[in-house]
């Protein structure tokens, strides 16, 4: 996955490349580095 560090906070849904199940990607950045990151399954 590609993360744009110029976007300070973002959350989006992407399909897993291995199992094709949806995952929610959330991250925060200070412009230079990623300060938080999470990837959580949203499959019920």
Image: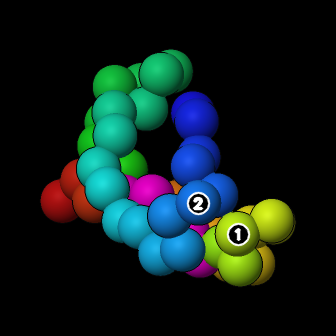
Could you say where residue 21 lies in the image, as x and y percent from the top left?
31, 36
Element class at badge 2:
loop
Q: Say which of 9 and 36 sits in front.
A: 9
Residue 32 is left or right of residue 20, and the answer is right
Q: Say which of 13 and 7 sits in front.
A: 7
Whether 23 is among the magenta residues is: no
Q: Say which of 33 and 17 sits in front.
A: 33
Task: Report the magenta residues as a range.
Answer: 24-28
Is residue 10 visible to the viewer in this orientation of the structure?
A: yes
Classify the position of the N terminus by image quarter. Answer: top right
Q: Is residue 12 above or below residue 35?
A: above
Q: Which residue appears at 45% of the width and 58% of the height?
A: 25
Q: Are marks 1 and 2 in contact (CB under 8 Å)?
A: yes
Classify the position of the C terminus by image quarter. Answer: bottom left
Query: What mark, if any, has residue 31 been given in the picture?
Result: 1
Q: Earlier in the sequence, mark 1 or mark 2?
A: 2
Residue 22, image quadrant:
top left
Residue 33 is left or right of residue 44, and the answer is right
Is residue 41 visible to the viewer in this orientation of the structure?
A: no
Element class at badge 1:
loop
> How many numbered circles does the render carry?
2
Query: What mark, if any, has residue 6 been given in the picture?
Result: 2
Farthest residue to the right: give it: 33
| Neighbourhood count class around disc 1 (C-alpha, 10 Å): few under 14, some 14–19, many 20 upward | few
Residue 29 is left or right of residue 1, and the answer is right
Could you say where residue 16 lies in the image, as x and y percent from the top left?
43, 32
Q: Which residue appears at 58% of the width and 36% of the height?
A: 2
Q: Is residue 23 above or below residue 15?
A: below
Could you say where residue 35 lies in the image, as x and y percent from the top left?
75, 78
């Amino acid at each position: 996955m590609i993360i744009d560090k110029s976007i300070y906070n973002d959350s989006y849904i992407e399909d897993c490349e291995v199992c094709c199940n949806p995952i929610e990607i959330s991250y925060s950045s200070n412009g230079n580095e990623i300060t938080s990151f999470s990837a959580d399954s949203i499959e019920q």
